[in-house]
Amino acid sequence: DAGITQSPRHKVTETGTPVTLRCHQTENHRYMYWYRQDPGHGLRLIHYSYGVKDTDKGEVSDGYSVSRSKTEDFLLTLESATSSQTSVYFCAISESFKWGARSSYEQYFGPGTRLTVT
Amino acid sequence: AQKVTQAQTEISVVEKEDVTLDCVYETRDTTYYLFWYKQPPSGELVFLIRRNSFDEQNEISGRYSWNFQKSTSSFNFTITASQVVDSAVYFCALSDQGGKLIFGQGTELSVKP
């Protein structure tokens, strides 16, 4: 199993408060991703990173920011949490996204963080 | 735009039945990857298979098999002789050229003893 941890695993917070979720990997993989999972939507990409200090927006990035100051850590911040951000958040990592039969392209996921905004 | 559709929201079968989970995708890319992930009741996401767009060979792994057909843009997943432990939500996903995954909505499979 890929070494990916997420913290906290569960959090309840109030509307308007800032929240930071942490993803930590021990695999030294270059690429890291944040997804949210909601009923009826599967998983949707929030932000991703292709290296230290290199990040980009995903499909549902509004209201979220990210930072990656070290290879092993990828932080997701909700500057002012809203009830619509109640969700399960998953971090994922991948070694490569180079096309080619020999590239390790799969994304491996962390255990998830269940966030409730009241 | 890229899209993955899993039309079956829920499937219920009795143990030892065969079951097929459907996945239809849309993409304009000529090179892409398709994936299946399993999410058991414990909540983690488990990688099952990757298939690239150049390889249409079907794959079998134990009781699991995958049928990739570019002509119909489908990547279906069959479980033979289902077991209670197969109960989970199964996600089909498509990768774009930047490595980002586009997921289907998921199919919840319930295998009853």
Image (tube, coloured by chain):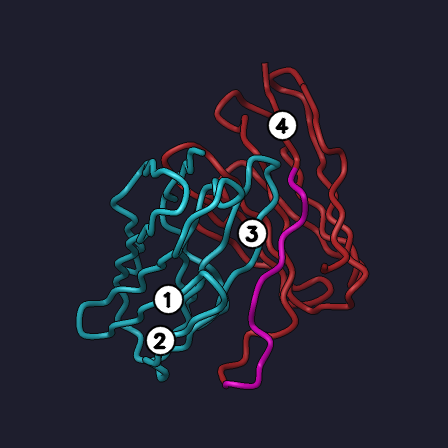
- Dot label at residue A47: 3
Tint of chain B: cyan
Q: Is residue B71 left or right of residue A20?
A: left
Residues marked 2 and 1, same chain = yes
Circles 2 and 4 in contact, beta carbons < 8 Å: no
SS class of the residue under badge 2?
loop
Check disc 4 and report the residue beneath it: A115
Verify whether residue A102 appears in magenta. yes
Q: Is residue A51 above or below residue A103?
A: above
The residue wearing badge 1 is B66
Q: Nearer the viewer, residue A29 or A110?
A: A110
Instruction: Report the residue marked by disc 2.
Output: B58
In the rendered structure, the residue with mark 2 lies on which chain? B
Q: Amino acid at mark 1?
A: Trp
Image mark count = 4
Q: Position of residue B83 (x, y in %)?
A: 47, 45
In the picture, the disc for residue B51 is: none
- Specify few, some or many for label 4: CA neighbours under 10 Å numbering under 14, 14-19, or 20 or more: many
- Say what amino acid the circle numbered 4 marks: Leu
Say which chain tag 3 marks. A
